[in-house]
Amino acid sequence: MEVFRFVDIYATKGIEYLIVIGFLAAFVFFTRYLALRGGESGTGRRAAESVEWFRVPGEFHYHQGHGWVKAGGEGVARVGLDDFAQKLVGRVDSIELPPAGSKLAQGEKGWVLRVGSRAIPMLSPLDGEVVAVNEDAVRSPEIVNEDPFGKGWLLKVRPERLAANRTNLLTGRLARRWTEEALHGLRLTMGGNLGPLYQDGGTTLPVHQNGGAAVTGIARALYGEGWETKVKEQFFTEGMG
């Protein structure tokens, strides 16, 4: 006669449940750890280096005329314009750069952006001698809009007073705070709201309030035909040709 043996399924399932719960707890801990590491090295860092639509990478020093400096090897620094500048101006048609051997002075005219018939001078962020010009940016100025901190660099300069110049440059938290103030000024122009934005070839542009196509450059969208004067005010180059 076959004997029926009672098996306590709750006891055996309990062990399985404990194993599953332990596995899930370990999995949750591991995924949170990865998310934390990813936030520190990826999203978190990108957020820390941006002010809403404007990138402000932490390894650069910024002049309040919206030029940047990045020190390199052999006593040479790279110079360019920041993300705020290229988005404010919009698509650049050509760039006039000083030739190698030229002397730059911090706070004086460094180069000129041309947008159509408009000439927009920008200030040099440091004193020094130009040792190289980015010919790629001269031939293809759109790279200044697409990659202002990388391929869109403008000049290589041998600084003459880098330590002294840095006292007039901003980095890290101060640079982000300064960009926030510039953004606040744009918002005041629009009554507190810049409205929606969209990407056009690497340049972020505001959409017209009537829902139509955006115009090239934030300044033109905000100020219309008077945009050139407003940009020069932002760049501290009023009165420069």
Image (spheres, rainbow, N blue to C red):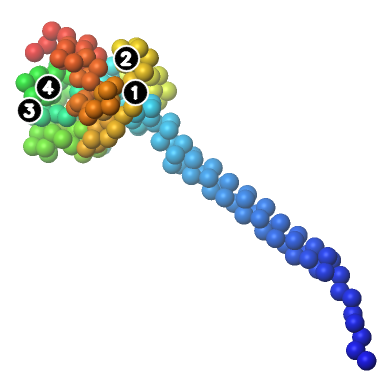
From the image, tell me which residue sits under label 1: 195
> What x and y, as percent, mark residue 134?
13, 35
- Amino acid at pointer 4: Val
- Cα distance between the residues tagged 2 and 3: 39 Å
Q: Which residue is mark 2?
A: 190
For residue 161, what is the image quadrant? top left
Looking at the image, is mark 2 or mark 3 nearer the viewer?
2
Give the residue at mark 4: 112
The label nearer to you, 4 versus 3, is: 4
Contact, mark 4 vs mark 1 (Cβ under 8 Å)? no
Looking at the picture, tell me which residue is in the foreground, 206 or 84: 206
Identify the amino acid type marked 3. Answer: Pro
For marks 4 and 3 on the same chain, the one whose residue lies earlier in the sequence = 3
Residue 125 image-quadrant placement: top left
- The CA distance from mark 2 to mark 1 is 8 Å
Name the kind of residue labelled 2 in the image: Met
Q: Residues within 10 Å of mark 4 (few under 14, many from 20)?
A: some
Residue 197 in view? yes
Name the residue rendered at 23%, 35% in the picture: 200
Mark 4 or mark 1: whose residue is earlier in sequence = 4
**Image position, residue 71 (x, y; %):** 28, 31
